[in-house]
Image (cartoon, grey):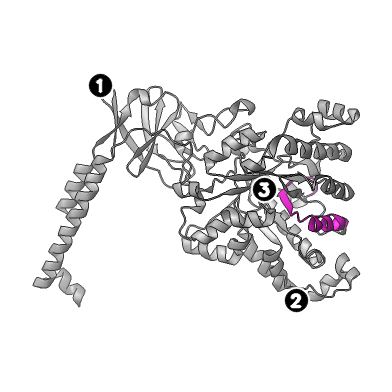
Amino acid sequence: MIRMRWWGCKTSAEMEISNMRGWVYRKILFIVSLWSIMSKGKPEKNKRINVPDEAWEEYIIDADFHLNLFDPKEYLEYIEDPRLRKKIEVGGIPKGVTGGWVFPYAHHIADSLNTQGTALVAEEIDGLKKQYAIDAVIVGPGMINLPTARYPIVKNAIVKAYNDYIVDKVIDVKNGIYGLAIVPQWDPAACVEEIERMKGEKGIVGVQGWYSPQTLFGAIEYEEMHRELVKEKLPLVLHGSGFTSRFDLLGDSMKSVVEALTLSWTYNAMANVMNLIFTGTFDRHEDLKVVIQEAGTNWVPFASLRADECYYALPEDVMLSHRMFEDGNDYLKHMPSEYFFKNMYYTTQPIALPKNPDHVKSMFEMCRASETFLYSSDWPHNTFDPPNWLFNNRGIDKETRSRICHGNSKEVFGI
Amino acid sequence: MVIQRKYLEYNMREKIIGRIEDFPEGRGTEVKLGGLKIAVFNIDGKLYAIHDSCPHKHAPLHESGSNRYNSEKCGGTFLGEIDLELKMIKCPWHGLRFNLETGESPVLKRKIPVYNVVVREDGEVAVVV
């Protein structure tokens, strides 16, 4: 009724309102025009990247930053055995079996692992992180195919050399550069030795392994390593590796990088998380913390709910896993989903945010992002995620943002 | 409606953004006009102005074609890519491509804004916004 009168004949009161609106509208237009005229600008000398201003005020820790240390010459001096040094000098790092990691086809560029550049020593990292409003980095190796390569003795030597190299040339706690010590996961006993060797080193804040289509990290072979990690209060940080390799029949049947990149690492990460939970790893090592890098985040609600659902249906199945059987435990101490949020952390890259900020908020609540997410960039790869998404989405509140930017990283890495 | 039209006519005008020498050939330059971010590319002496934010993750498109960090140690040199022949730029972060003349991306179903550039006789450069 009112609408009909509005479009038909107006009352005098309505005319007054209409005129008032026109006056306000004209004033707004005048102010906007004035601002527009006054703001004609000149090219600005930028600070390189358009990360929002608020990002420069937030303390940001990048929990997945890569060295891209491909040339073994950089760390040859740390390999003592002349036989191994000669092998590595001539043959380089043993090649992993990637079976289809052909980014030049997918990305029209020859070198996809350095799309943003390269940084190999502390000074270079320090200069770089300031460009992206990053205050601290957790440096990881770029040698993601090492687990699938041959020559375990050579690989063990490379692991040790890499760890010595980062202690010597990369870690700089005063400038917020921390590192992860690699463990040779193909040799569980050597993992323990390497943790013991590296545990006292300043700035080593975690131990790096790779989730891949190989032995899962809940395997009983890693029992001593888990014990050592808890004892030394170091998290196990797992990064993707070796997908579409000879070990992964599903991955091997994929025909393009885009297929593999979308899910391959995610399902390998999920398999490791499930394995750690259902083998009772966290029941025996309650304080073990595991960080999953570069598997994305949005799978966490599904996987945790699905784990609970299956556990309801088949609870007695867990008693047949090695640890549970040995310990005489018939059931897990907690529901499977609880371990997802109590023992696990997830780095954010590759973040795949829903378009609707309300959905982002819900997704983050379901993932308990304020307790489990660690910001990460994946610099310098083609999948690079600078921190701007944290500052331009109304689905992410300030407190959650602070936890993701630094709170959770400080907690898990003991920074 | 009359006011709106007047406003548009008044506001669609040339805004000076610098001089021709401020826009080196073969690369992009960042320009901020109030809240508007524009990337100006000089391709063979002709200037193109395009919205300076990739719709994927808001990367600054003006960086396309600039040096990678520590590029002397990398296999290649550049972030993104500028295709001089096709007048296409590639996003410096993840590689989406955009046509500098139309704002079209071969992938996206929409265009990003492009702006006419006017180079005046005295060397002043303006964009029409």
Q: Are marks 1 and 2 on the same chain?
A: no
Residue at 47% x, 45% y is B58
Which quadrant of the structure image shows residue A220? bottom right
Please state which of residues A134 and A142 is positioned toward the viewer in this rendering.
A134
Residue at 46% x, 50% y is A54
Which quadrant of the structure image shows residue B38? top left
Which quadrant of the structure image shows residue A164? top right
Q: Which residue is mark 2?
A: A313
> How many numbered marks are there?
3
Q: Which residues are magenta?
A: A221-247
Q: Is residue B84 above or below residue A24?
A: above
* Chain letter of the residue beneath label 3 in the structure image: A
| Disc number placed over residue B122 in the picture, else none | 1
Local packing at callout 1 (Cα closer than 10 Å; few below 14, some 14-19, many 20+) is few
Q: Quadrant of the C terminus of chain B?
A: top left
Q: Which one is closest to the eye, mark 1 or mark 2? A: 1
* Chain letter of the residue beneath label 2 in the structure image: A
What's under tag 3, amino acid-wise? Ala
SS for tag 3? helix
Residue at 28% x, 40% y is A39
Q: Are marks 3 and 1 on the same chain?
A: no
Q: Are marks 3 and 1 in contact (CB under 8 Å)?
A: no
Q: Are marks 1 and 2 in contact (CB under 8 Å)?
A: no
